[in-house]
Amino acid sequence: MKRYSNTALVYAILAMVGGVFYREFTKFNGFTARTTLSMVHTHYFLLGMVFFLLLLVLEKNFSFTGAATGRVLAVYHVGLNLTAVMLAVRGVTQVLGNTLSSGVNAAISGIAGIGHILLGVSLVLLLLQVKRSVPAAQG
């Protein structure tokens, strides 16, 4: 459970860094339009900090962690960080006004998509682990 709370803290810090970077980078560049750079903050807060705080509560109540949990969480971390990095890359290019070739644009979208797929698959696998542990905890 300590690992979940430490991970939540790390993602809270990353969320704050992402939020400050978004605010200061756009202000420094005089950018006022919408940018995906703002989503780094919310992704890290919700899918990072809040998610791991929820896992902490679920572990305390249902003891769902098993042998495969570490591997599933490793995939979750990769997916979340890959998604956040691609959001940052796309956001920085938007703020700087860089024109991307169609290949680079597709690559950024594709890599972010892979991150989202990894997040989705690992989230479902974790929910299945929790689901299996609920009857055992009630019995």
Image (cartoon, rainbow, N blue to C red):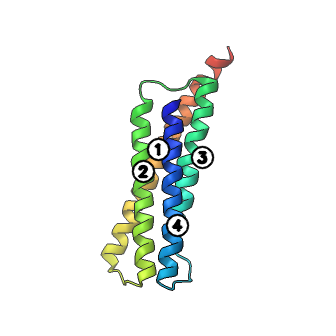
Mark 2 lies on residue: 79
Q: x and y percent of residue 47 in the render? A: 54, 50
Q: How far apart are labels 1 and 2 at the CA level?
A: 9 Å
Nearer to us of marks 4 and 2 is 4
- Label 2 sits on a secondary structure element that is helix
- Mark 4 is on which residue type? Val
The answer to which of marks 2 and 3 sits earlier in the sequence is 3
Mark 1 lies on residue: 121
Nearer to us of marks 1 and 2 is 2
Q: How far apart are labels 4 and 1 at the CA level?
A: 30 Å
Q: Mark 4 and mark 3 in contact (Cβ < 8 Å)?
A: no
- Assess disc 4: are there few (<14), some (14-19) or many (≥20) residues with their C-alpha within 10 Å of its C-alpha: some
Q: x and y percent of residue 53 in the render? A: 59, 40
Q: Mark 2 and mark 1 in contact (Cβ < 8 Å)?
A: yes
- Label 3 sits on a secondary structure element that is helix
Q: x and y percent of residue 114 in the render? A: 39, 55
- Mark 2 is on which residue type? Gly
Q: x and y percent of residue 35 in the render? A: 52, 75
Residue depicted at 57% across the width and 30% down the height: 130
The answer to which of marks 3 and 4 sits earlier in the sequence is 4
Mark 4 lies on residue: 20
- Assess disc 1: are there few (<14), some (14-19) or many (≥20) residues with their C-alpha within 10 Å of its C-alpha: some
Q: How far apart are labels 4 and 2 at the CA level?
A: 22 Å
Q: Nearer the viewer, residue 35 or 17?
A: 17
Q: How far apart are labels 3 and 1 at the CA level?
A: 18 Å
Q: Which mark is residue 50?
A: 3
- Mark 1 is on which residue type? Val
Q: How far apart are labels 2 and 3 at the CA level?
A: 16 Å
